[in-house]
Amino acid sequence: MKEFNGSVEEKSTGNRKWKRISLITISSFGTQFLWSAEMSQASPYLLSLGISKTNLALVLMAGPLSGFFTQPIVGLYGDKCRHRLGRRRPFIIYGGISTMISLFCFAWCKDIAGLIMTNEESHRKLSAMIAVISFYILDISINIVTVSNKCLIIDVLPSIEQPIANAYGSRFSGISAILTMLISLLDLPKLFTSNTTNSTQLKIISYIGAPIFILSHLIMCLTVHEKPLTSIKKASSKVRNRWLLIGVFNKFWDVWRRSLRGSIIKSICWIQIWAGLGWFPIMFYSTVWIGEIWILQSSSTTTIIEDQHEKATRIGAIGLLFQSILALLSWLIIPRFIAQFRIRRYGTQSLDFGKTLVYLWTISQLSFGFLLVFVAPLCEFDYKLAVGLIGLTGVPWAITCWVPFTLLGEALLHKPDQLRIPLVSVLPDPELPNITEEEEEEEEVTEEETILPLLEARESSLEIPMCNEEDKKEGLIDTPKNDD
């Protein structure tokens, strides 16, 4: 009877954990919906406004640039936020509101410009300007929400539960990306005809995506409760704003130059930087590339009507749909396969110290490079081959989104002191006296109330139970080996 009761209790605990981790990661479903819609629709839409392909590249830099500047700043502000709702939810709420406003300004830029300008040329220029500005604000807002969601997982979950939460988040993102691409394939203006509004593909996708984004984050905000921060002294806003950028980037530069010397973390960052150059055109130009090939194949005349451009965008989204499907399947299958291989080869997953993941990542990057350099030129004369090429990139894309962060987590499990850096103490407190660098180094080690431990279990209102055997079998976690 004891064994039976124990198994029932273990099953019940696993079910509660599944529900609770789903609640904290469901926000990734709404965020990914907007990201996928932006990837498939933004480039063709901006080109239709008269923006050249050269200038389009500058506009699309909004994503990487906003991520580079926004995420560390929002993270640091959140670390010292003492709002009654917690440290992360205020940024999620305000960032979500900004996301909705900028999304509708982007989709309705022509209508907004029409209220101001009547001249055709002035209307076109104003529409393009509104679209570019709202696109930048949209990317910044989504980055604010994204980094706050990730920080919330770190804040409320113990370190051993975080890989499980990341895996759940990846699955939500994969399902959301597939749903977005399926919707993008439909001729939405034809399905939702209206005599009163000038509906477009992007407008209707915005109508669909906005409730999904709001609902997913509303569920997360209502079910996950943070404890308001009260222990950190509050610096004046004048000092905070003056030293924020300088303090952030000085601290990051010092960490990069000294603390990460000889660390695998630095190697991961370098690889991600250079790999991003290859993934940038895949993320933002795939729809345009496939659509242009389809237009050249299907057009018998030199005149290209607007309906062809809209259909070309839908054809281009097929490649991203196949990419999303393969990425989701890879997220579901590859971690289990790798976990079983590591156990069979080394006895436990922790004994190979990430070698298997490094080899897997290397193979995926080489495969991606081969597809771009040798296969892509052969696909420029048939849009079906181009669709297949973009679809095949789903496997290396899934590995790129999974392996680096897993390697980072394993590096921290084996050497947790590598990232024990008091980033939240970047902002100076005017009430504290000036101290020397040597005194500051000693204080950074001993001042516990301004350092959030990265690898210790933190108290949370979720009370999520620890891992069970099913998670180990799925390859979602790797219990660190005790060296004692």
Image (tube, rainbow, N blue to C red):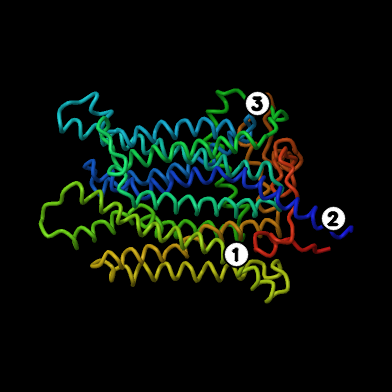
Q: Is residue 303 left or right of residue 484?
A: left
Q: Is residue 196 left or right of residue 146?
A: left
Say few, some or many: other residues with alpha carbon within 10 Å of mark 1 (under 14 / 14 to 19 / 20 or more).
Answer: many
The amino acid type found where label 1 is placed reads Pro
Q: Kindly report the distance in space between the C-alpha atoms of the residues bearing marks 1 and 3.
A: 39 Å
The count of marks equals 3
Amino acid type of the residue tagged 3 in the rendering: Arg
The N terminus - image quarter: bottom right
Mark 1 and mark 2 in contact? Answer it, CB < 8 Å: no
| Residue located beneath label 2 in the image | 5
Identify the mark nearer the N-term, 1 or 2.
Answer: 2
Residue under label 3, please give it.
Answer: 84
| Residue 44 spot, x, y in % from top left | 28, 48
Mark number, residue 274: none
Query: Among all residues in the image, which is located at the extreme right?
Result: 1
Judging by the rendered image, the residue that carries numbered circle 1 is 335
Residue 409: x and y, percent?
Answer: 64, 56
Vertically, is 317 above or below 251? below
- Spot occupied by residue 418 in the image (x, y as percentages of width and height): 67, 53
260 above or below 92?
below
Task: Give the number of the mark in front: 2 or 3.
Answer: 2
